[in-house]
Amino acid sequence: MVFSSLLFVFFFFAITMAVYCYVNTIEEKNRVLLISSLIFYAWGGPKYLILLLLMAFISWFSAIQIEKFQGNRILKRIFLILGLGLQLGLLGYFKYAVFILENIQNITGSPEVIPEIVLPIGISFYTFQLISYVVDVYWGDVAAQKRYTYVLLYCSLFHQCIAGPIVRYIDVAREIEHRKPRIPEIGRGINRFTIGLFKKAVLANSCAQIADTFLPEGINNLASVPALGLWLGALMYMLQIYLDFSAYSDMAIGMGLMVGFHYKENFNYPYISDSVTEFWRRWHISLSSFF
């Protein structure tokens, strides 16, 4: 379920916001967001919901133990290594296990059969967020969250768990338990979401169609395209990539404002950069800040 689909805009998101506005207390609102986020994530693959629940539990438990042994440097560090090691181990397994096994097979001839491992949707984004949470607790920048459901809500919020931006826990810790969206911010959120929807549905998709026309698959097909067409296709592909990413960030930031969350900006006109370093700083800002 993508943000620009009719199913999301007129069914899922509309129902979620209607129920969210109907309930009164922050705890009830968080429950609505958590349930809707888990449904949204399970839509793309119910079996991977178990993985999300497990990784959230690992971070929740690790952070509590780190805070518990704040005065014991050895135990504190052990739980940090344990928490991060499990998170990165699971991420590495799903992202690189097939690649490693293929290389081993090419060198040694075994294993004969390489298992098919499907990469869970959004695993990189919520893993990075959970890692940042544990590290923030380790350095004492934020208190460990005692409620597992709130840690799960933090990493699974459907606004940003699939395509970012990466949100540090310290930036939204207070808003999870204490937030009150105001009418002007809701208006800004609707406006930002609409801009992102236009970017994706109109601009990015149009650029994609042109890019596919002038950059067809296969060497023989490419050879039949004139040089000017190849340049146009490359330009459209460049715009498509930027518009896709920035559109999802716009929609995520807008939806966050509608419910009282303030996500940081994620793109800052990267194509006006004067250097690769500046481009990196302007492109996917949340990833840069995470590292």
Image (cartoon, helix red, strand yellow):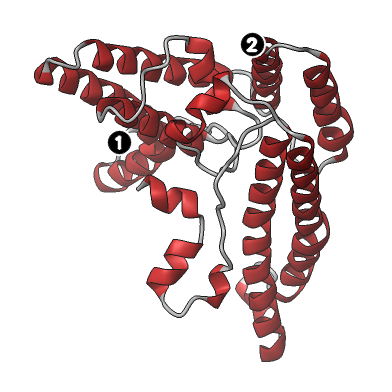
Quarter that holds the N terminus: top right
Amino acid type assigned to the residue bearing label 2 in the image: Glu
Q: Nearer the viewer, residue 73 or 242?
A: 73
The residue lying at 43 percent from left, 39 percent from top is 95
Q: Position of residue 130 (x, y in %)?
A: 42, 28
In the image shown, does 255 or 114 lie closer to the viewer?
255
Q: Earlier in the sequence, mark 1 or mark 2?
A: 2
Q: How many labels were placed on the picture? A: 2
Disc number at residue 145? none
Tell me the residue at 54%/31% (across/down): 120
Query: In the image, is 263 to the left or to the right of 68?
Result: right
Q: Is residue 215 above or below residue 21?
A: below
- Of badges 1 and 2, the one in the foreground is 2
User: Mark 1 highlights which residue?
Assistant: 110
The residue tagged with tag 1: helix, strand or loop?
loop
The residue that disc 2 covers is 27
Q: Taking the image as drawn, is residue 19 in sight? A: yes
Gap between marks 1 and 2 measured at Cα: 53 Å
Residue at left 64%, top 11%?
A: 27
